[in-house]
Amino acid sequence: MKAQPQASHFIDGEYVEDTDGTVIESIYPATGEVIARLHAATPQIIEKAIASAKRAQKEWASWSPAARGRVLKKAAEIMRERNRELSELETLDTGKPIQETIVADPSSGADSFEFFGGIIATAMNGSQIPLGGDWAYTKRVPLGVVVGIGAWNYPQQIACWKGAPALAAGNAMVFKPSEVTPLGALKIAEILIEAGAPKGVYNVIQGDRETGPLLVSHPDVAKVSLTGSVPTGRKVAGAAASQLKHVTMELGGKSPLVVFDDADVDSAISGAMLGNFYSTGQVCSNGTRVFVHKAIKETFLTRLKARTEAIVIGDPQDEATQMGPMVSLAQREKVLSYIDKGKAEGATLVTGGGIPNSVTGEGFYIQPTVFADVTDDMTIAREEIFGPVMCVLDFEDEAEVIERANATEFGLSAGVFTADFSRAHRVVDQLEAGTLWINTYNLCPVEIPFGGSKQSGFGRENSAAALEHYSELKTVYVGMGKCEAPY
């Protein structure tokens, strides 16, 4: 099984290699097999990519918004035509089941290109301001060269979620995927060129921990958009702030999901499972602290246990498989260490907690895991695990659960399940998070803004709001009479 790309980087409309860069091995998580070998960008590759983007951005920005929009919509069309091929590559890259990638990964990237391609002709209009005899107007203008730094859980989606608004607004992008999942973004870059984008408008370079700082600190970079962990976000935001660069930070979470006693129990269990087990739990917005009212706790746990143990774990390329492996051995070991902490600190293991017997070989599989009787001070209730580990906590009082839900440095997402819509809106108004759901969980269509508060980041991805983070306002005052001075 091989997925070797033509070369490691895609710059100025073509594949580029520099074997002096550190070797990056792309490993298929279901078997542990090396399926591609690439090279991290050398300083020369970084300079080449940024210079290409800087040159191309001026041409691209001169195009009308409608013309840029046509390119993005064409890219969306191509992605949909190749959805199966792109989904299979995403499965190799991440280990996620094909039944998931085929509906959630390249298709959501295509949605992003289509959405921003469709709204850009009118979304960046300015305003006219009457000032008596004089007047002024405003316009939104691109920032220039934007760096996108992706995470490994949704590599193709993130490449598009960052690229679509950036390109729509007239910027050029240099995108660095995670070294764990280096393959998908190269195909996105190919497709954009095929769709008619100028060479250099969207470049992809591979890299490791040393590559990011070189991109962030480059004087020709105007903005950095990162999806990653809170510690990484702090470093990147600090480095960008030292040079007054624009930033968007989409970081981690430890999100609360509150299930009241009047909720539809099966619906709430579905929401909790989507918010903990989809993508093998490797989703930043996951509702990993599930607060369940004591009156329905036993019913909730009994049904949850049965449904969790029925999840089909296996070969990600088999369409019957519902859960694949973790993305890497290191990530599995990290999650298993958190499971050990949960047991040691007194949480009740309801199900899971180890490596499934249903799979063989060297893949990075782990059982979907549920802990009950979790308390707020336990490590598994405080720290982001980023794996299929659900923590169920008890509560009785609305005010109490709101206070406990907010007692975290994170503020990415939250959810509420209840039949009382007055209570639902009252509670979400008090939960400290950027993206919230009522009676569902983890749905992120491109039409709505996505992003966090507190230590979970700032700025928004998706929706027309994202364009504000990839452009800046220019104000022009127009004097209609003679200019006079008092001296």
Image (cartoon, rainbow, N blue to C red):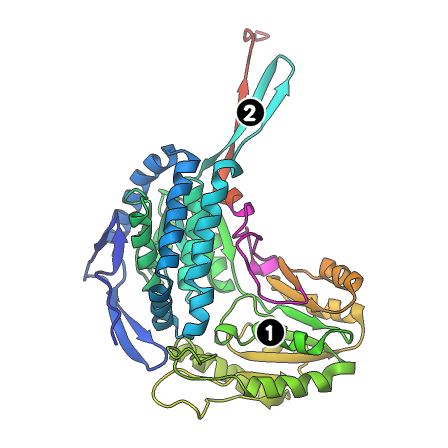
What's the magenta bit mostly, secondary-structure-wise? loop
Residue at left 64%, top 61%? 436
- Please provide percent x and percent y for residue 145: 38, 43
- CA separation, marks 2 and 1? 47 Å
Quadrant where the image shows the N terminus: bottom left
Residue at the far bottom: name it.
357
The residue that label 1 is drawn on is 288
- Answer with left or right where residue 209 lies relative to residue 480: left
Q: Place residue 132 in its image quadrant.
A: top right
Q: Are marks 2 and 1 in contact (CB under 8 Å)?
A: no
Residue at left 28%, top 51%? 46
Q: Does residue 339 appear in this view?
A: yes
Q: Amino acid at mark 1?
A: Thr
- Please provide percent x and percent y for residue 32: 32, 81
Frontmost residue, 379 versus 96: 96
Q: Does residue 242 appear in this view?
A: no
In the rendered image, the vertical position of residue 221 relative to residue 180, given as above or below: above
User: Residue 460 colored magenta?
Assistant: yes
Q: Amino acid at mark 2?
A: Tyr
- Please provide percent x and percent y for residue 409: 62, 64
Q: Earlier in the sequence, mark 2 or mark 1?
A: 2
- Answer with left or right where residue 467 lies relative to residue 399: left
The range drawn in magenta is: 438-466
Residue at left 48%, top 79%? 322
The residue that label 2 is drawn on is 137
Quadrant where the image shows the C terminus: top right
- Answer with left or right where residue 350 lies relative to residue 68: right
Residue at left 52%, top 54%? 446
Q: Place residue 53 in its image quadrant.
A: top left
Tag on residue 96? Answer: none
Mark 2 lies on a secondary structure that is strand
